[in-house]
Image: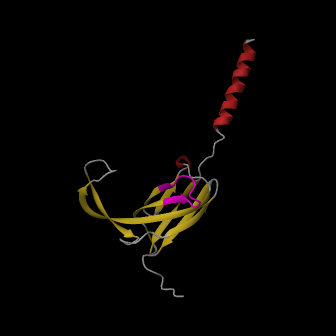
Amino acid sequence: MMRMRWVGGMLVGIGLMGLLGCGPSGAVVMGTVTLDGKPVDDGSITFEPADGQGASVGSTITAGKFQVDSTQGMLPGKKKVTIRASQKTGKQVAASPPAPAGTMVDEVRIFPPRGTAPPVESAEIKPGDNQLEFALQSKPTGKSK
C-alpha cells in the first residue's frame, strides 16, 4: 500500500512539472550596435511587437553589445527596434529618477541627434538564440532619389 502511494505521488509530481514547463519561453537576443562603424559605448535598445500586441523588452548597450535573456520574456515574432546612443561627459551631476539619489556621470545623447525621433529598425525574432547586428549612421548616406 505504501508503495502505491509513493508511485501515485511521483506521477502527480511529474505531471505538475510538465504543466509548469509548458508556458511560452522567451527568446534570447544578443548582438552588436555600431554608429559610423564604431561600437556604441553606451545606449539602449528596445524591441516592441510590430503588431502592438504584447510587452516591449529592452536592454542596455555597453561597448557595442547588448543581450536580452530568455527570462525577460521576449516572444518570437516581428519587432520594431528603437536604438539610442549616449556618451558620458565625465562631469558629475545630481542623479534624477529613476536612478537612486546621489550623483552620476552626465551623459549626452549622440544618436539620434537631439530634437529628432529615433529611426525604427525591424527584426524577426525566432524561438531560441538570435544574433543581430545594427549598423547606424549619424549622417544621411547621401543617396538621392
Question: Which quarter of the image is occupied by the N terminus?
Answer: top right
Provide the residue span drawn in magenta: 46-58
Q: Is residue 9 magenta?
A: no
Residue 139 position by quadrant: bottom left
For this orientation, the residue located farthest to the top is 1
What residue is at 47 percent from the left and 56 percent from the top?
59
Residue 115 position by quadrant: bottom left
For this orientation, the residue located farthest to the front is 52
In depth, the one of 63 and 35 nearer the eye is: 35
What residue is at 59 percent from the left and 49 percent from the top?
26
For this orientation, the residue located farthest to the bottom is 145
**Up-down relation of residue 70 to residue 1 (above or below):** below
x then y, percent, for residue 46 = 49, 59
Q: Is residue 53 magenta?
A: yes
Residue 88 position by quadrant: bottom left
x then y, percent, for residue 4 = 75, 16
